[in-house]
Amino acid sequence: MLKVVTIEDLREMAAEARESIWAQAQAYGREPKIYLHWSAGHYDSVFQDYHINILEDGKMVCTGDLNEIKAHTWRRNTGAVGISLCCAYKATSEDLGPEPPTAAQIEAMAQAIVAVADGLWLTIDRDHVMTHGEAADNLDGLYPHEPYGPQTTVERWDLQYLGTDESPQYTVNYDSPATGGNVLRGKANWYRNEGM
């Protein structure tokens, strides 16, 4: 099921799925998570692995219910929502390729984070909202797998940088305000504080 959704739709969908998602996460002894990705595909390619796909123009497409277990983040999918930017085809750590994240996608992702976090009653911080790269290096203190992110094997480095003035280049310093994860969480918290 592919469905174009609004921010308000996402907030309602997350609220409807809250009890189920919390139960799934608590079965693993943790709280729900939101994982942020890019597809490494084209601007118009939607993937079923993610709950929410964000197209080039910022339009959001859902692929099913938010409490459905999708295959977006290795060993972390239960009790988690996956949000992906449809972009980064042929991206490398030095060049985000011919289809880098667009400004519309970045803003839509920040707003989607707020909507899902509001519906699930989550704080927007790195313990609850992580890029796939951050999750791959177990930055939340959970260790469901050996690290495979930017500080280790670099198998996954989704959104480690965004190619914007705020996040211009690849870094392995997760405390840098210029990582994609820190920029996206910062934008999401700004939207939340503005009462989006």
Image (cartoon, rainbow, N blue to C red):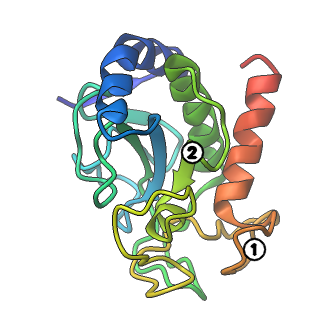
Q: Nearer the viewer, residue 162 or 186?
A: 186
In terms of sequence position, does the residue under pointer 2 or pointer 1 come before the other?
A: 2
Residue occupying image coordinates x 28% and y 41%: 78
Image quadrant in which the C terminus is located: top right
Q: CA distance from mark 2 to mark 1?
A: 21 Å
Q: Nearer the viewer, residue 46 or 68?
A: 68
Image quadrant in which the N terminus is located: top left
- Indicate the secondary structure of the residue bearing disc 2: strand
Residue occupying image coordinates x 44% and y 68%: 136
Q: Quadrant of residue 25?
A: top left
Residue occupying image coordinates x 64% and y 57%: 181
Vertical placement of residue 114 versus 154, above or below: above
From the viewer's perspective, is 151 left or right of 45?
right
Measuring from the top left, give residue 194's x and y in whole percent: 82, 22
Please state the total of marks drawn on the protein image.
Answer: 2
Vertical placement of residue 9 versus 128, above or below: above
Query: Is any atom of residue 185 visible in this view?
Result: yes
Measuring from the top left, give residue 126's x and y in whole percent: 64, 50
Q: Amino acid at mark 1?
A: Pro
Residue 168's mark?
A: 1
- Between disc 2 and disc 1, the foreground one is 2
Vertical placement of residue 149 versus 190, above or below: below
- Indicate the secondary structure of the residue bearing disc 1: loop
Verify CB contact (< 8 Å) between mark 2 and mark 1: no
Give the labeled residue for mark 2. 129
Q: Nearer the viewer, residue 145 or 194?
A: 145
